[in-house]
């Protein structure tokens, strides 16, 4: 006969998914790698509310690492995988993910009143094949914030058609 455990007891039986641990290890490796490259780490795992989705639910954005590369403020996404059998790791940083990070970066800059500093969006991929040394790759300027700016229509354009 099976026993039904109270909710609190059941929750203690569930371990965090392996992907969470893989991601944490990857972020640690990426932070050390970036430090060796001369980056100065500012914050890890920055989270902030970035708005609401189409169902009205609050959306929280996260940036894995924020660092300074010289005088450039870098918002860095870290992706870790144990293999690239299905697709290159970098493909996980799709347009949706880029938009979410861009929105979160705007919130970060607004909270800390950061103006007049160059910003960049970088990606660090960490490939951790079992039994082998991790391979870490840095893609500086993987995307531009301008590709996510809302475009406003110039009123004059529409008057020209009248």
Image (cartoon, helix red, strand yellow):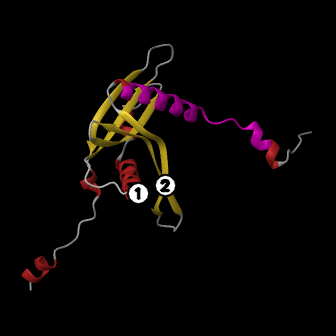
Q: Nearer the viewer, residue 14 or 110?
A: 110
Q: Which mark is residue 107?
A: 1
The reply to whether the C-beta atoms of the residues labelled 2 and 1 are less than 8 Å apart is yes
Q: Which residues are magenta?
A: 10-35
Rendered residue at 50%/55% (across/down): 60
Side of 14 relative to 20 (left or right): right
Please state the horizontal and vertical placement of residue 32, each as a whole percent of the image.
43, 26
Extreme residue toward the bottom, this view: 162
Question: Which image quarter holds the N terminus?
Answer: top right
Rendered residue at 57%/31% (across/down): 21
Using the rendered view, name the quadrant where residue 152 is placed: bottom left
Does the magenta run of residues contain 11? Answer: yes
Report which residue position mark 2 lands on. Answer: 48
Q: Nearer the viewer, residue 137 or 116?
A: 116
Please state the horizontal and vertical placement of residue 46, each as a whole percent of the image.
47, 46
Q: Is residue 85 visible?
A: no
């Amino acid at each position: 006969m099976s026993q039904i455990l109270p909710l609190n007891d059941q929750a203690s039986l569930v371990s965090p998914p392996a992907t969470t641990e893989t991601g944490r290890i990857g972020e640690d490796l990426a932070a050390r790698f970036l430090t060796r490259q001369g980056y100065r780490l500012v914050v890890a795992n920055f989270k902030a509310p970035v708005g609401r989705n189409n169902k009205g639910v609050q959306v929280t954005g996260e940036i894995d690492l924020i660092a300074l590369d010289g005088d450039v403020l870098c918002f860095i996404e870290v992706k870790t995988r144990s293999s690239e059998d299905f697709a290159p790791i970098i493909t996980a940083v799709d347009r949706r993910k880029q938009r979410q990070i861009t929105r979160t970066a705007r919130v970060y800059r607004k909270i800390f009143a950061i103006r007049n500093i160059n910003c960049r969006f970088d990606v660090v991929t960490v490939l951790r094949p079992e039994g082998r040394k991790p391979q870490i790759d840095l893609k500086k300027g993987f995307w531009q914030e301008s590709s996510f700016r809302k475009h406003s229509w110039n009123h004059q354009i529409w008057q020209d058609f009248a």
